[in-house]
Amino acid sequence: QAWAEADVDHGLIQNRSDWADALSSNGLILSRAPAQLQAEKEMVMLAVKENGEAVRYASRELRNDREVVMAAVEQNASAWQYAGWELRNDRDLILAGVARNGRILQHAARR
C-alpha cells in the first residue's frame, strides 16, 4: 500500500507494522511519526533508505548515528545538511556524499 501523510492525520497508521510499511513507501512520513519511532533506529533506517532527507525528522541521537546518516546520504546527498554536528567532519561520510553530489561540501563543518 502507498501511504500518504494524510493517512497519519486520519489515524489509518495504527500499529508498528503499518508504520514500517508507511516509512518504507514514504520516508517523509517520519515527520508525522511519534517521537518514540523517530528515535528508533530500525524505523528511521526504513525511512532514510526510501528518502534520505527523512533523516531531518530523526531524533538528535540518530542524526548523529554514522550508519543512519550514511544511509541517508547514500540515498540523497542533500541529506548531509541534516547530519548532527558530530558527523560533519567524518571523512568517510563526506566522501560518500561528495561521490553522490559535490555540493554537500557546503554543509561540511569548517575546520
Image (tube, rainbow, N blue to C red):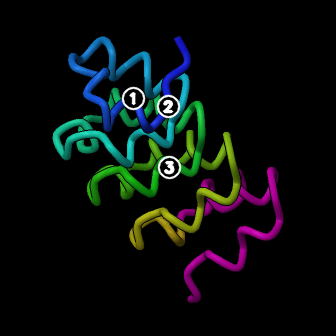
Question: Is the residue marked by circle 1 packed among few (<14), some (14-19), or many (20+) residues within 10 Å?
Answer: some
Residue 95 sits inside the magenta stretch: yes
Numbered range of the magenta stretch: 90-111
Q: Which mark is residue 69?
A: 3
* SS assignment at label 1: helix
Residue at (24% x, 36% y) in the render = 37
x, y percent for residue 58? 35, 50
Q: Are marks 1 and 2 in contact (CB under 8 Å)?
A: yes
Indicate whether 13 appears above or below 92: above
**What residue type is disc 3 on?**
Val
Task: Identify the element where label 3 is drawn.
Answer: helix
Q: In the image, is residue 44 above or below residue 83?
A: above
Q: Position of residue 105 (x, y in %)?
A: 72, 74
Q: Is residue 84 left or right of residue 10?
A: right
- Name the secondary structure under disc 2: loop
- Which residue does the image show at 21% across and 41% down from the upper left? 34
| Mark found first going from the N terminus, 2 or 3 | 2
The answer to whether marks 1 and 3 mark residues whose Cβ atoms lie closer than 8 Å is no
Q: Is residue 110 above or below residue 38?
A: below
Q: Residue at x 53, y 71 (%)?
A: 89
Q: Residue 4 carries which label?
A: 2
Residue 1 percent coordinates (x, y)? 52, 10
Does the residue at mark 2 contact the one at mark 3 (Cβ under 8 Å)?
no
Amino acid type for the residue under numbered disc 1: Asp
Provide residue 44's location: percent of width, then percent of height: 38, 36
What numbered label is drawn on residue 7? 1
Q: How crowded is mark 3: few (under 14 residues within 10 Å), some or many (20 or more)?
A: many
